[in-house]
Image: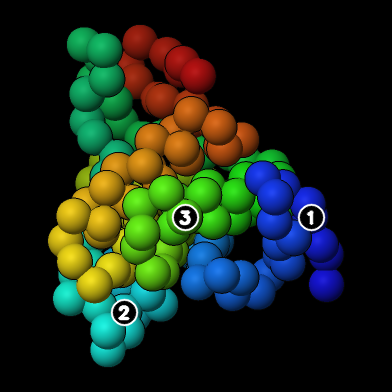
Amino acid sequence: MTRIWAAGHVLQIGEDVNNVHVAVTAERLSVDVVQQLVRGDGDGAVCCFIGHVRDMSLGRSVTRVDYEAYAEMAEREMHIIGVRTLEESGARSIAMHHRVGALAVGEVAVVVAVASAHRDEAFSGCRQAIDGIKSTVPIWKREHAADGVRW
């Protein structure tokens, strides 16, 4: 198993590490599956963020989006984000799944679920996690529109 030292933690890619579940996949994402990965009997709250492909971006009509990733590095960074999110928010468990490939308008591109005893920790953790994914994870988006393609 691969071990990565990051943010003061040894992370094992491909395993549930510190209640952090991550995936970068070409398969359709299931919100139910992601929620089930985090939900425990002690959790009173599960907060989910579901990101869909939208039909407009910066005033342009979007017809589809292609997501590309350096999957191994993306999953490592998502693990780091997950561990940090749990520590800082006080939540108990987190799952982050991101889709790659060609996605049509309306399809699910990313799902984040955070479980905790109380709602405040779940809301806080969910926002922190999706913001971390958007800012540091090596996943690139190419938007297709009638007037051309834009990264």
Density class for disc 3 (Cα within 10 Å; few <14, some 14-19, many ≥20) is few
- Point 56% across, 70% down: residue: 18
* Spatial separation of the CA atoms under disc 1 and disc 3: 18 Å
Q: Earlier in the sequence, mark 1 or mark 3?
A: 1
Q: Which residue is mark 3?
A: 87
Image height of 96 relative to 150, above or below = below
Q: Which residue is mark 2?
A: 39
SS for dot 1: strand
Can you tell which quarter of the image residue 41 is in? bottom left
Q: Which residue is mark 1?
A: 4
In front: label 2 or label 3: 3
Q: Position of residue 24 (x, y in %)?
A: 56, 56
Q: Earlier in the sequence, mark 2 or mark 1?
A: 1
* Spatial separation of the CA atoms under disc 2 and disc 3: 18 Å
Indicate left or right for 69 with 6 as reference.
left
User: Tag 2: residue type?
Assistant: Arg
Q: How many marks?
A: 3
Q: Earlier in the sequence, mark 2 or mark 3?
A: 2
Image height of 96 relative to 148, above or below = below
Indicate left or right for 130 with 50 as reference.
right
User: Tag 3: residue type?
Assistant: Glu
Can you tell which quarter of the image residue 70 is in? top right
Circles 2 and 3 in contact, beta carbons < 8 Å? no
Image height of 56 relative to 125, above or below = above
Front-most of 111 and 147? 111
* Spatial separation of the CA atoms under disc 2 and disc 1: 26 Å
Front-most of 106 and 22? 22
User: Tag 1: residue type?
Assistant: Ile
Circles 2 and 1 in contact, beta carbons < 8 Å? no
